[in-house]
Image (cartoon, rainbow, N blue to C red):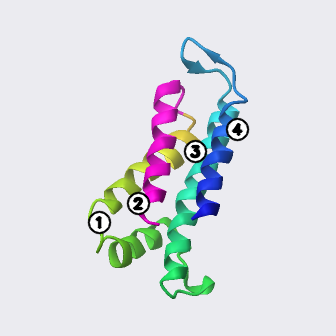
């Protein structure tokens, strides 16, 4: 899990490169990059958990749908809210933040990164 948390720390460092005006990040490039790196941290945490549970690198998920299935089968047993949290992080970090570049407000971006970190800590 240290590696997954490192991704979150890297995302925060990337985000700090963007100027802020009126509580909004000015440079979309840094926000998009930070969201992408944080999302990779979420995926890394899931992969680490699965590998500790006996899955080989070859058996790890290769699509978002496969991640969903693995969470439902192997992680949600312990916490039924994990799949909903994963879906929210997918929508916020990957789609809105990284893919579409729709996140600008500093408080929103910081909350989403905090949510990613909390998700990672839950599946330790």
N-terminal label among 1 and 2: 1
Q: CA distance from mark 4 to mark 1?
A: 31 Å
Provide the secondary structure element on which disc 4 rests: helix
Q: Which mark is residue 99?
A: 3
Disc 1: which residue: 79
Provide the secondary structure element on which disc 1 rests: loop
Disc 2: which residue: 122
Q: Nearer the viewer, mark 1 or mark 3?
A: 1
Determine crowd level at label 4: few under 14, some 14-19, many 20+ residues with C-alpha closer than 10 A.
Answer: some
Q: Quick check: is 118 in the magenta stretch? A: yes
Q: Nearer the viewer, mark 2 or mark 4?
A: 2
- For the point 48% across and 65% down, which residue is it? 64
Q: CA distance from mark 1 to mark 2?
A: 9 Å
Q: Is residue 112 above or below residue 4?
A: above
Give the prevailing secondary structure in the magenta stretch: helix
Q: CA distance from mark 2 to mark 3?
A: 26 Å
Q: Is residue 72 left or right of residue 48?
A: left
Determine crowd level at label 1: few under 14, some 14-19, many 20+ residues with C-alpha closer than 10 A.
Answer: few
CB atoms at circles 1 and 2 under 8 Å apart? yes
Q: Is residue 47 above or below residue 11?
A: below
- Magenta span covers which residues? 102-124
Q: Is residue 18 above or below residue 92?
A: above
Q: CA distance from mark 2 to mark 4?
A: 24 Å
- For the point 48% across and 50% down, which residue is it? 116
Q: Which mark is residue 14?
A: 4
Provide the secondary structure element on which disc 3 rests: helix
Residue 20: x %, y % from top left: 63, 18
Q: Quick check: is 116 in the magenta stretch? A: yes
Q: Is residue 4 left or right of residue 66?
A: right
N-terminal label among 4 and 3: 4
Name the one closer to the observer, 47 or 121.
121
């Amino acid at each position: 899990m240290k590696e997954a948390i490192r991704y979150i720390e890297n995302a925060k460092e990337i985000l700090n490169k963007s100027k802020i005006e009126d509580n909004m990040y000015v440079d979309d490039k840094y926000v998009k990059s930070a969201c992408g790196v944080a999302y990779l941290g979420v995926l890394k945490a899931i992969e680490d958990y699965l590998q500790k549970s006996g899955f080989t690198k070859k058996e790890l998920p290769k699509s978002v749908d496969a991640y969903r299935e693995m969470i439902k089968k192997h992680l949600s047993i312990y916490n039924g809210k994990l799949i909903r949290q994963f879906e929210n992080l997918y929508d916020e970090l990957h789609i809105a933040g990284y893919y579409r570049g729709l996140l600008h407000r500093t408080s929103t971006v910081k909350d989403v990164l905090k949510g990613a970190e909390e998700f990672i800590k839950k599946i330790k």
